[in-house]
Amino acid sequence: MTSPVDPHDEAAPPPEPGLKLLAVTACPTGIAHTYMAAEKLTQAAEARGIAMKVETQGSIGAENVLTDNDVRTADGIIIAADKDVDRSRFEGKRLLVTGVSEGISDPGGLIDRVREAPVHRSSGSSGSSASAAGAGDGQGGGSDGGAAAGASGPAGAKGRERSVGYKALMNGVSYMIPFVVVGGLLIAVSLAVGGHPQADGGLVIPDGSFWKHVNDIGTVGFQLMVPILSGYIAYAIGDRPALVPGMIGGWIANTGELYDSKSGAGFIGAIVTGFLAGYLVRWIKLVPVSRFVRPIMPIIVIPIVATSALGLFFIYVIGRPISWVFENLTEFLGSMTGASAALLGVVLGLMIAFDMGGPVNKTAFLFGTGLVSKSPEVMGMCAAAIPVPPLGQGLATLVRRRLFTDQERETGYAALFMGFFGITEGAIPFAAARPARVIPANMLGGAVAGGIAGLASVGDNVPHGGPIVAVLGAIDGVALFFVAVVVGTAVTGLTTAGLMTVGERRTGRAPDGAVPEAEAAPSVAVAAASSAPARPTVKAGAGTKAEPIPGAEAEAKAKAGAKTGAAMEAGDAARDEDGSPAPSKEPEVLSGYLTARTVEERLAAESKEAAIREMAAVLGRSGKVTDSEALVRAALAREEQGTTGLGEEIAVPHAKTDAVSAPVVGFARSPEGIEWGALDGTEARLVFMIAVPEAAAGDEHLRILALLSRKLMDSGFRARLLEAADKDSVLRILAEIH
């Protein structure tokens, strides 16, 4: 493989035999840029005669993992990543931390800088164990600041890095989600299968029974989810020494008895303790201590000091206001019993949906349960509002799927199930990840549900909520109860989707890292066939050329793509039967996903959107595209998440969508180049498009991207693709990808 000269050097760098470097690359999606940065770093090292091993942390898992022996003999380590990477294994080594984009755009510069980078220390006062999240934003502390500063390169300048707080919050949420799902589903299943209806309509699981034990296991999951959220927020900020104070702080926050409150602070309290613990640990690391004390700082001194300080601070300072809020909210609700039933229902619905298990939620719930025997209508208002947050968030993941990540969509299904059984906590992962958008939507839907239930005098005779209590006969006014739940759920779901869409449009990026859904098919002019009339246009640096007039021909070409594939297959068969020379056997390219039919020798499009539409038409020739417009929307939505322009004149637009019946890959060339937003500023001349069904995406989707990304780093391979005379030549060259 021919290695390119570093663009930042005037001449090829001299060989440096004997030097050994390591690197770790990772991007948020774990796909193309991860492997591209790895290849660029490897090439730059080869050009200097430097031995380098690169570990890629992609979506299919870590590959080429760095061993202890590798680290021990290394002269320096580069972390080019836009996600958290564990740095504890690089203790005592020169460490440079930066964004993945610098690994692509300036690999030679990183190799030069790592030899002068600070030595990584994860203990004592060095402060160098700030999390990858912090370093990624150039906010590492202490003597490791130089390494952290490495992130202030192009990636940081372009605003691609998320803040320390956002990364920490999402780290906590990602670890919490399994506990929410497992705990909630076990509780729901145990109630559904092992619960015995009572005369009053309630559900009771007999003590000592199998399903009681299942219920207890689920309860443990729910008890752990709040400390897990807090602990891993702290971990992302302060590294391992912050994990213990974060988890213990989260447990204290969720245990109201420790500060004389009938209800804990719930997930909101856990977020507070997580950030407090993380930043407290980072501050303690800055305190200078003797070198003899440094070894015990991360395992004894820091956890004990931080845990004690945080726990006592929460009990004596933060806990008292929480208890005060609980008591005064109870008094406030008691003063409203003579007010309008609809108004009381609105207030109870707002409170139920606000913190989903915190003091505000528990105040409303306990107020309702205390009046079950006297005024079941009050509990009816609560029962209607309780399932709205999880049902509404689950609905949002269904109606606007591409606004959510894969993990969130899976959590949405679990939230729907938990909502049916009246488990409000099913919405916590969504609220923790996007509190400013999800909590208002939850409260609005809860208020609507509670208000309708109050207006209709819906009664609940048991201290529980959700559709399950109606199914089991505990609700008076079942029809109107379901009206309240359905309307409230719709309000929450649609409001959530609306707020996320507004946020996406304001920021010009996918909300909170999710993949946005295109609002409609873009009205992009696609180049017509060569026979279409043209008008002159001027392109910078290209002179005057003929520009096809946008018309309906390209649009019809995209819509008819699926039909043409089948027609071409029939034509080939007929030609063989007629005795005409059969076409030569095509080489196997990317497991047969790319064929002669999905190769276009020349793209007519001049913009990224037009090129994607034209590529969708090319894929349509395979007969595997069932909805060309949906494919275009999915590909454009992926572009909103981040450009698929990989640099080096390459673009790989891709989509996971049920608009295709099977995986399919297309290729086309654009001699003039198309602006694709690549990190290195080059226009795309080699365009690959990948489409896979949602159900079949998995590792196959990532495998194709990884293979392409690696092979396309070979400048000779790219040159031969551009110069290939015809489709057969292109296919023979592409067959080298394996």
Image: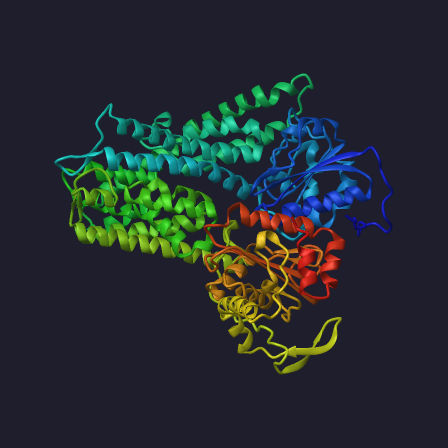
Q: Which residue corresponds to the image point at 54% horizontal and 29% vertical from the top-left? A: 242
Please give the count of numbered marks on the rendered protein.
0
Question: Residue 472's x, y, as percent?
Answer: 18, 42
> Does residue 366 appear to the left or right of 674 in the view shown?
left
Identity of the residue drawn at 30% across and 49% down: 446
Does residue 674 appear anywhere in the picture? no
User: Horizontal and vertical percent for residue 621?
Assistant: 54, 66
Residue positioned 21% across, 42% down in the render: 469
Position of 393 with respect to 279 (left or right) is: left
Residue closest to the far top: 292
Closer to us: 350 or 449: 449
Position of residue 302 relative to residue 328, above or below, is: above
- Between 13 and 268, the one lying in front of the other is 13
Q: Is 619 left or right of 425, judged from the image as shown?
A: right
Q: Is 671 drawn above or below residue 402 in the view shown?
A: below
Q: Position of residue 155 (x, y in %)?
A: 66, 49
Quadrant of residue 42 within the rendered picture: top right
Q: Nearer the viewer, residue 145 or 217?
A: 217
Position of 1 relative to 520 (above/below): above
Q: Residue furthest front?
A: 579
Q: Residue 541 at what x, y percent from top left?
A: 76, 71
Q: Quadrant of residue 401?
A: bottom left
Of 394 and 592, the residue lying toward us: 592
